Image: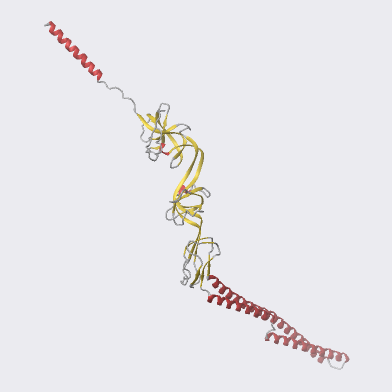
Amino acid sequence: MQTQKTFICIIRAVAVLSALSLMACSKPQAEPQPVVSVQAEAVKQGAISQVITADSVLSPINQATIVPKITAPVLKAHVVRGTKVHQGQLLVTLENRDLAAAAQEGRGNLELQQAQTVIATSSSVPEELQKAEGDAATAKQNLDAQQKLFDSRDALFQQGAIPRKDLDASRVALVQAQAQYEQAKKHLAGLMAVGQQNSIKAANAQLVAAEGKFRSAEAQLQYSDIRSPIDGVITDGPLYPGMMPQAGVPLITVMNLSQMIAKAHIPQNLAELLKKGDDATVAVAGADAPLKGKVILVSPALDPGSTTVEIWVQAANPEGVLRAGSSAALSMVAKTVPDALIVPAEAVLTDEEGKKSVMVIGSDGAAHKREVETGIQTKDAVQIVSGLKAGEQVVSVGAYGLPDNTKVKIEAPAAPTKEGGDQSKSGSEP
């Protein structure tokens, strides 16, 4: 009986030890920390530029829409669409035989009036002036006669041959004759001054009128020759011989395509960063590379419809790649920082509060979150104003959603795919 109890105790002890052993074996063990594969780049130091992009429409640097000033049939068209022309070149001749005849008639009338003006200014005096001259001559003769009579009577009076009343009567007649002569002279002088002046003025007025009619006829004749006001290329028109263009209706368009203007509208806050002379590029579909240009206008006023600012960029177009009316993509350099700290754009993270941060790979092989202040941002890179130092490594690919203090393994970027080959990857640990 005692042996049986001893055996039962031994069995229980073994069971307890087995249970304790099983409990010890079932205790959880710490799992190893995972390692995340990322790509990394060192913080670089170099130049970065603030680039403003916008869609634009291309216009020629100069354009002339030629409108005929007269209505007449087309006599001859000297150019066709696509013809390069220079300033003053004859483009179209309108029917002008009637205008040439009118100009010839006007020239004849002008020459006739010129001759009549010469005759009028040098001809004899009018009848009224002749009468005044006669009256002055008669008054002079009467004055001379009265003077002789007075002298004779004065001599007789001195001799006592006549009474004083006869001498006084002669003196009165002499004074009257003197007054009449003075009045006649003044009248003659007035007529001579006014008459000659009016005669010359009338002749000159007729000459000016004749010259004006001739100039008008000559201008009408010149309007029949339609010439280019600028250097450029014909982009519209002309009409064919025999057709009747109407006065005031566009006939030919000439565009100077050697330089093009790209016009765009951008928000006001971006326009404030630009100024005249900033570098820019103009890119169009089908072109091998963007064309270099310059900002030539930043409008001082907002567009009332869109509250945006109009920007003009001028670019040379020697090969004719840029076409008027087509769309183009503008890239304008607003400002450049020559010695900035730069990281890839994908390395910068933004939280819900708008704070910026990057994941910096430390010497412990872990990625640590660090807040930064950013500056200029482009499509591929971001300027770091504060929070990083040159040479530090930041996670460039794989930073999004990466927990702080996570162990990472740096992988090299995928090699470019070669035609007929496969992509290859290589990795290295820090």
Q: Is residue 154 left or right of residue 16?
A: right
Residue pictured at 21% horizontal, 14% vertical: 17
Residue pushed farthest bottom?
Answer: 161
- Confirm whether residue 198 shows in the render: no
Vertical order, 351 against 321 (above or below) = above
Corner quadrant of residue 361: top left
Please identify the residue farthest to the right as the structure is shown: 159
Percent from the top left, x then y, of residue 287? 45, 50
Task: Report the side of 165 relative to 243 (left or right).
Answer: right
Q: Quadrant of residue 116?
A: bottom right
Is the C terminus in the top left, top right, bottom left or bottom right quadrant? top left
Q: Residue pushed farthest top? A: 2
Q: Which quadrant holds the N terminus?
A: top left
Judging depth in this view, the residue of 132 and 91 nearest the camera is 91
Q: Nearer the viewer, residue 97 or 301?
A: 97
Indicate the colouring scheme.
secondary structure
Percent of width and height locating residue 190:
70, 81
Q: Is residue 23 above or below residue 55?
A: above
Residue 117 image offset from top left, x and y in percent: 65, 79
Outermost residue, front direction? 420
Q: How many marks?
A: 0
Q: Is residue 282 above or below residue 129?
A: above
Viewer can see residue 47: yes
Q: Indicate the position of residue 145 as horizontal and vertical percent values.
A: 79, 90
Residue drawn at 25 percent across, 18 percent down: 24
